[in-house]
Image (cartoon, rainbow, N blue to C red):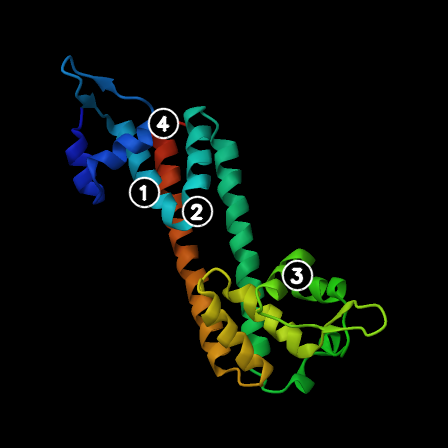
Amino acid sequence: MYYKPIEIANSLDITPSALRHYESWGIVPAPKRKKNGYRLYTEEHVAYFRCIRAMYPGFGMDITRKVMKYIQEGNATDAFWTVNKEQAKLQQEKVLTDQTYELLQESFVSTLPEKFSKEKMTIGYIAQLADVPASAIRHWEKEGLITPHRDPENGYRLFNQIHLRQILVIRALRRTVHYLEIMKNIVKEIEHNNIDEAKKATKAALENVNYQNRNQFHGVCELYKLCEVLDLVK
């Protein structure tokens, strides 16, 4: 059975041109054509298109394209491990965002856990605590999000507990707060120990992670269905 592009496009709520884009990117097999040039899409093509549309919200197009390349090669194993790696990254993001939200529930820096109690921390030490690269912290400083102290003798950056809170919040929000001035305002409130806005923004970031998790499972579900159609799983 063959399908017209408009039939598939309507079922997925996209335009026929989107189908042609996927084809031109090489992430679906090239269809047969009629003598007049019209494409002849099969059940396999429908499964590919459904999988692509389902995977995109949770994994993004770069990962989706990579996975579709593996599937066309008949390599379901690497396709599954690729999405598994992305799910592991999201799990780590969930853990870190949860920790940040919990940390923000306490109003005073004196209540921070003992491992966060150092008043003067180097960039290497605070980067390890916050689980972010030191280069990211330097970038956030350049953007005006944080302002570490400087050792008067050697000029090295020195961070305190408030800086740590700011870094943890920036890390949690960087995927959901895209406007620099909004981020600056949230971080500034932490400096004045007014963390209500930071709590709200971090909670929103956590909700976004949960939403992405559901999208990823939807994508994995359609990926497995595609593999069944192609007889790549037993």
Give the alpha-carbon distance from disc 1 to disc 3, as whole Å: 37 Å
Circle 3 Cα neighbour tier, 10 Å, few/some/many (<14 / 14–19 / ≥20): some
Q: Position of residue 112 (x, y in %)?
A: 67, 81
Q: Earlier in the sequence, mark 1 or mark 4?
A: 1
Give the alpha-carbon distance from disc 3 to disc 2, as whole Å: 28 Å
Q: Amino acid at mark 1?
A: Arg
To which quarter of the image does residue 42 belong? top left
Q: Amino acid at mark 4?
A: Leu
Q: Quadrant of the N terminus?
A: top left
Q: Is residue 85 above or below residue 156?
A: above
CB of mark 1 within 8 Å of CB of mark 4?
no
Please give the residue where the numbered disc 2 appears in the rendered image. Answer: 59
Q: Position of residue 226 (x, y in %)?
A: 35, 34
Q: Secondary structure at mark 1?
A: helix
Q: Earlier in the sequence, mark 3 or mark 4?
A: 3
Q: Is residue 125 left or right of residue 11?
A: right
Nearest to viewer (mark 3 / mark 2): 3
Residue drawn at 57 percent across, 58 percent down: 92
Please give the residue where the numbered disc 4 appears in the rendered image. Answer: 230
Give the alpha-carbon distance from disc 3 to disc 4, as whole Å: 48 Å
Give the alpha-carbon distance from disc 1 to disc 4, as whole Å: 18 Å
Please give the residue where the numbered disc 1 appears in the rendered image. Answer: 53
Q: Secondary structure at mark 3?
A: helix
Nearest to viewer (mark 1 / mark 3): 3
Q: Is residue 194 above or below residue 72?
A: below
Please give the residue where the numbered disc 3 appears in the rendered image. Answer: 138
